[in-house]
Image (tube, helix red, strand yellow):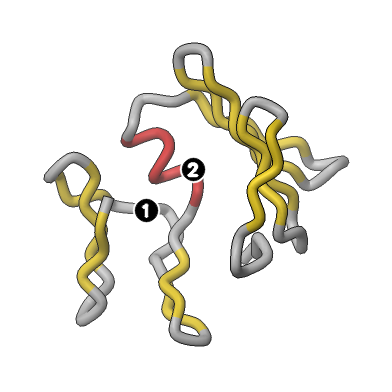
Amino acid sequence: VYADISDISVYVNGIKTEFDEPPASENDRTLVPMRGIFEALGAEVYWDEKSETASAFLNEDTTSITIDNNIMLKNNDEIIITNSCLYK
């Protein structure tokens, strides 16, 4: 996965990926919609409105992230991310 910052084009496995919401640049970071990236990789993505958590399932892996939280879970292991998850 890489992004071309000039127009924030995102490529997954060499294929340009389109999103429902466009990627954005904020505080020297490129933010992309989780659903678009994970679906492009072949994962199933679910949104839990009550907990405001997005979860992706691919093969034996589960990844989840909650709005306004900078901890992502991958197979229940915590991964600290530099920006909190945003919902726009």
Q: Which residue appears farthest toward the top when viewing the image? A: 60
Task: Report the number of numbered marks.
Answer: 2
Above/below status of 15 relative to 5: above
Q: Residue at x 22, y 77 (%)?
A: 7
Q: Which element type, helix, strand or loop, lies under badge 2?
A: helix
Task: Find numbered disc 1 in the image and state the secondary structure of the residue it sits on.
Answer: loop
Q: Quadrant of the C terminus?
A: bottom right
In the drawing, what numbered circle is on residue 75?
none
- Choose top left, top right, bottom left or bottom right for residue 59: top left
User: According to the image, label 2 marks what residue?
Assistant: 35
Label 1 sits on what residue type?
Phe
Residue at 60%, 68% in the rendered image:
82
Residue 78 placement (x, y as % from top left): 70, 42
Task: From the top left corner, tell me how far across and down residue 55 is, in percent.
Answer: 63, 33
Residue at (48%, 55%) from the top-left corner? Answer: 33
Q: Is residue 45 left or right of residue 23?
A: right
Q: Earlier in the sequence, mark 2 or mark 1?
A: 1
Sort mark 2 into few (<14), some (14-19) or many (20+) by Cα contacts within 10 Å.
many
Query: Neighbour class for label 1 at 10 Å: few (<14), some, many (≥20)?
Result: few
Residue 52: x and y, percent? Answer: 78, 47
Q: Which residue is mark 1?
A: 19
Which residue reaches farthest bottom?
Answer: 27
